[in-house]
Amino acid sequence: MTDLRYEAPSSLDDAVALLADAGDSAKILAGGTDVLVQMHLDLIEPDLIVDIKNIAELRSIKKVDGGYRFGAAVSGVELMDHADFCQTWPGVMDGVKLIGSLQVKGRASVGGNVCNASPAADSVPALIAAGATATIIGPKGMRDVAVEDIATGPGKTSLDKGEFVVSFFLPERAPNSGGAYQRFTPRSEMDIAVVGVGIDLTLDGDGVCTTARVSLGAVAEKALLVEEAAATLIGTKVDEAAIANLADAASAACRPIDDKRGTKEYRIKVAGVLAGRVAVVALERAQNGGN
Amino acid sequence: MKKTHITTTINNDEVDFLCEPGETLLDVLRDELQLTGTKEGCGTGDCGACSVTVDNVLVCSCLVLGVEVEGKKIETIEGMADGEELHPLQRKFVEHVALQCGICTPGLLMSARNFLEKNPDPTEEEVRFGLAGNLCRCTGYQNIIEAVMDAAAEMRGA
Amino acid sequence: MGMKPTPFGTQIPYEEKEFKVVGTNPEARPDAVDKVTGKARYAADINLPGQLIGKVLRSPHAHANIKSIDTSAAEALKGVKAVVTRDNFADLPVQHASAGEIMVNFRDVTRAMMAREKALFDGHPVAAVAATSESIAKAALKLIKVDYEVLPHVIEVADAMKPDAPLLNEEQFTKGVEPAPDKPSNIAAQMTSVLGDIEEGFGQAELIVEHEFNTKAAHQGYIEPHSSLANYTEGGNAEIWTSTQGHFLIRAQVAKVLAMEVSRVKVTPAELGGGFGGKNMIYLEPLAVQLSKKSGRPVKMTMTRDEVFRASGPTSGTNIIIKIGVTKKGRITAAKAILNYQSGCFPGSSLPLCTPTAFTRYDIPNVLVIGNDVVCNRPKVAAYRAPGAPMIAFGVETIMDEIAEELKIDPIEIRLLNAAKEGTQTHFGPKLGPIGYIETLEAAQAHDHMKTKLGPNQGRGIATGFWNTLGMETSATLNINQDGTASFIYGTVDVAGGMRAAYSQMVAEELGIPFENVKSIQSDTTSLGFNFTTAGSRGTAAGGMAAVKASRDAITRMCEVAARIWEVEPDEVVWEDGHARPAGSNVGDFDPLSLAEIAAKAGFFGGTIAGHAEINVTGGGPGFGTHLVDVEVDRDTGAVKVLRYTIIQDAGKAIFPDYVKAQFHGAAVQGIGLALNEEYIYDDKGVMINPGFLDYRIPVASDIPPIETQIVEVPNPLHPYGVRGVGEVPIIPPLGAIANAIYHATGVRMRSHPMSPPKVLAALEEAAPAVAAE
């Protein structure tokens, strides 16, 4: 910490340049709700902190091509205060609202939540279920990546040295779509997910599910996109039988660990239970025209 | 280590200070500025005892770097009362025995005030969830919830 | 200092009368405004010019020999002004003393404070530095080289008791066992409490239930980390500001470990941010003093939350076997408890204090309690609110529930049938005086809570608790001021903010002056005689006794002055309604003299007026409580939600009733936290892996339902206002009550804590075939 430098660039190019020159222990600072905790616990000792909150692209929330693009450093509270975004993507907001307390959400960003790459991150299964993509910038320019391809393991991402996430894109909503996210925690609040499930689905005019995406958090080394689970819903009316199959598929996809927050068996069981509960909410929202 | 010079507004006063890049806003408030009303309970954003507002957003000051607040508006517990006149929340906390040892109280008052600004007519359950980011070990939360509901009613003019 | 009641104790008998101030809720609570405005000064808020920041180097190993410590690189770092290790602290011989509700041995105290031969737990202090900034101090710690020889470790109490367990102390042989063992053991001592004939008692039983219970270590969870500021002056004196429940104990312990005279150590208790028994011991104070001595500057040290969890005094993890025998009609004939308690890295758990509580709610003719104090590689246990009692009640109250169900007797009825009352012989010696246990049970039966209808997967549990109230040394001075106000100087640390209001109320009541005219001021160790630490629910009880005695003493002085003014005999003057009056019309026709008038003239008529109390209080009144809880269990996840909670407790006399209820709330919620989610989790190297508020899960506001309370008052005859200590009883029932409620919701009995979702779900799944078969 004795050699720590703090920089707050105001443009993407400046940020990229700073990171290109920096050593391996440079850290991006958005909300700081992971980075500062890790510094306090002496888990990391960065020599450079690059604060990206002064860069316009990182902080905006805009409708683009019918979809939504929001900056990676937008805080949870800023998203919660955006009425239209909340109405369009309640499932994503289920996840964002659970990132932490009001104080934490006043700072925490989806970019940080995704790139910190905790397998239990609350915004991630919801984003994956919603089909979100991340726009990344680095020394070699910009590229888009599906959110499910960012984390590769606990604390590890597929980003190259000097890259960071600029913004997230959520595509235009099809009619009769709905999404939801729930997690299991021992306390009612202020906890890390023991299991998290995000589901997004679209119904046709007869109420039959035409597309679905199911994502599980905290049950593997990263959040999973589980196609077998989605397959149990597609072509059905998301009835009891489909949900039972969904629960089994969700449990089967888990490859969890035992840790201080939950055992393997517990996570496998609860993943199935939660998947069923989340599917019900996603279905209701789809039936109510997306709310 | 070289310190950075920061100018900011705290409780409506223009204030400047020097701090190391790794110092948190909490460190700055307590150690550089002797504003010790804001407390450290955990240093990792899990207890809320260090809650302040920065540009009207409620945050844990242990999760903000001192160097980040250049030009921003900060409010701490020291600014909550208006001279000798206590804020309704402060009065109601005293009336309802919503504090015992008092260490969590400044953070709770800052959170409660911010919560009521956004939700002036909450249900009891909404208050419980809204204040979940503030840990208290002495009171069991019962009287805190009552105090906040009562203050909310008074502030609504009900 | 010891825990035995002295034959020379002070008890002021209860007088039934109309109270004017006591029993009301004062509007202007003296500590509150400073706390809500952020002006109250806690230990970490206090600074001295030129102070250094101190930090502690802690063992990363649960058990290791310390072969060498090289501090040279740290000492050479620019900005480092002092470094201390075991070489800077004297080795102390065995010597026992009391520290709140736990006994300590100074040979062990000095080693817990700073490791000598061995590191005995993850977090054990090995060295400390003082530097000009926190970042330099932290960098200096990294430069200290310690050569550890890592040893096998043991943590769970059952593991530590095994004959082949790794030994913490090769020279420890179990005390209290006949014949004396020749093999060393982690079992430091065994203690026994006997009443009647246990074999005969079980012989008479027609139903016997016996179960084993296991609980984990848990932390008091105070939101304020330990913090101490020490200034050693060249004259050889140390002044210390610290977060503590007992500054006189801290003074004694510091003096002992630093070989200083008690008169050279001054300790000022800062406003306390929660203790619950965890702040009766030295942790940082002697380190800060020694660093200050070496550096010539004040040294401030504050624990991080991580250090608080790893290295302060969490409570015992336990292994408990309870066996109760009853007749078919539900009358208990015999009760036995085996209590295996972790004491931490050195002996001295709370067993001596909690074994008396094991069965004291019930009138049982044959009792046997055997306690084993077991060392293991975790920090030395400190007290935690009714230390050790919640775990025993977990066992006893769930077995009573099981017996009630088996015999088809209502759970409250079976307790009434066996209830302890005035005259009941306890199993730890005395007979009980007047108590309010039955009253709390009857109030529970009549309570609205019992009428709430329960839905599917919901269940109701009841449990009861008992705790005694300590008295001990209490010293206070009451100064009567010239302007008619009174200053009550007290040394029983106000741990939760309400005691000083209660003292002012009692003084105001005695003197007959308004509450607002009495200021209760917490002082340091120089201003008063010895005061025992605030523990054992003694704050309002013992401190209040001193307030009353000092008030009556002051009244005697004021009557003497009035007598001189009127030129009559002192026994011809009485005190009434805040005034001195002639005892009768035959004494003379004198206008009453107010306290203000007497105080203004007192200097001329004999001197300033003060009342004193320097007493050892022995009138502690036993407290009893009954709790009701409704829970809902999510059968698919094992999550337990508390729906409704009711606390009914005998307070003897509630001096400040709203405050008493607030204490009920706080203690019960700590009990709920214990029941549902709190536990110490260790990895296979004996390192605590959840030392933070994220993974050590204390309840948050949304976990708790509204809590109802009811105060029962059966006055304690040995206290002038009938006060019984209230702070500890309410933490005792929740574990048992919630376990019983879970049973009635699901048919599954939980016998280990915490009753967290994975464990409840596993228990439900294990029971599923049996339940399905019914």
Image (cartoon, coloured by chain):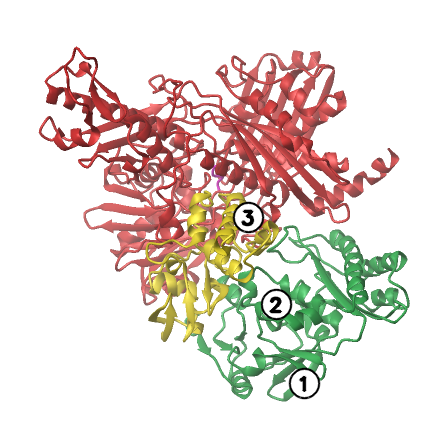
Q: Residue tagged by mark 3?
A: C151
Q: Give the vertical position of B105 relative to C429 (above or below).
A: below
Task: Report x, y in % for residue C560.
Answer: 16, 21
Q: Residues within 10 Å of mark 1 (few under 14, many from 20)?
A: few
Q: Give the vertical position of B107 relative to A46 (above or below).
A: above
Give the amino acid at mark 3: Leu
Q: Nearer the viewer, residue C175 or C521?
A: C521
Hue used for the chain lettered C: red
Callout 1: SS: strand
Cα–Cα span, label 2 and label 1: 27 Å
Characterize the magenta stretch by its predominant secondary structure: loop
Give the amino acid at mark 2: Met
The quarter in which the N terminus of chain C is drawn is top left
Q: Residue tagged by mark 1?
A: A143
Task: Report x, y in % for residue C412.
Answer: 66, 24
Q: Nearer the viewer, residue C56 or A197?
A: A197
Earlier sequence position, callout 2 versus callout 1: 2
Callout 2: SS: helix
| Tag 2 near tag 3, CB within 8 Å | no
Q: Residue tagged by mark 2?
A: A80
Q: Residue at x 59, y 88 (%)?
A: A139
Hue used for the chain lettered A: green
